[in-house]
Image (spheres, grey):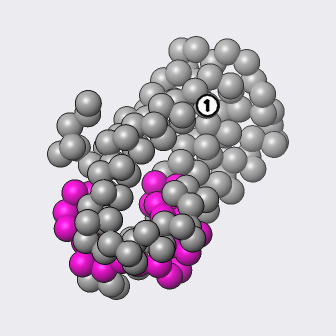
Amino acid sequence: MPNKKILPPTYFFITLLAAYLIYLFIPVQKIITYPWNVFGIIPGIAGAILNMIADKDLKNAGTTVKPFEKTSTLITKGVYRISRNPMYLGMILILISATMITGSLSPFFVIPPFMILIENVFIKEEEKMLAEEFGVDWENYKKKVRRWI
């Protein structure tokens, strides 16, 4: 199991680097050609904006951004109405963006393992902590809002 002291952005950047290296050394097949691959910037911008808004919402609520630290507030408004994990979703969108821009099929293969890692190392533990801290409020929120989208 990955080290829980390593924060999600580290895994994100490692995955982004892996996608680029796979593109360089195992490009397989172009599936998105120019100029269509340029549209790959759209999910990247959306992901970056989603991350900034989610981060701002957490900070405005006076609660932590870091996984495994006790949270003081259950945020259910803003981007948290759409996804229980908007920051992780933002990372996924940025990875999709980067792989679309390469136009190659092979970099896309890094995205599912990244999602599985984030879900198993961070999300499950975070949700367990939220359930313990917020009880019924968490359960009600969880029924209304999906984990990813």
* Quarter the N terminus occupies: top left
**Residue 105, image x and y in percent?**
68, 25
What residue range appears in magenta?
64-89
Q: In the rendered view, does 134 fall on the left or right side of 94?
A: left
Residue at 66 percent of width and 40 percent of height: 101
Residue at 48 percent of width and 73 percent of height: 141
Pick whichever, 136 or 66, lies toward us.
136
Give above or below for 132 relative to 123. below
Please name the predominant secondary structure of the magenta segment in the image.
Answer: loop
Secondary structure at numbered mark 1: helix
Q: In the rendered view, does 144 fall on the left or right side of 103?
A: left
Query: Quadrant of residue 13 in the image?
Result: top left
Q: In the rendered view, does 72 fall on the left or right side of 61?
A: left
- Amino acid type, callout 1: Phe
Residue neighbourhood size for the residue with mark 1, other residues' Cα within 10 Å, grouped as few (<14), some (14–19), many (≥20): some
Total numbered labels: 1
Which residue is label 1 attached to? 108
Q: Which residue lies furthest to the front in this view?
A: 136
Q: Is residue 93 magenta?
A: no
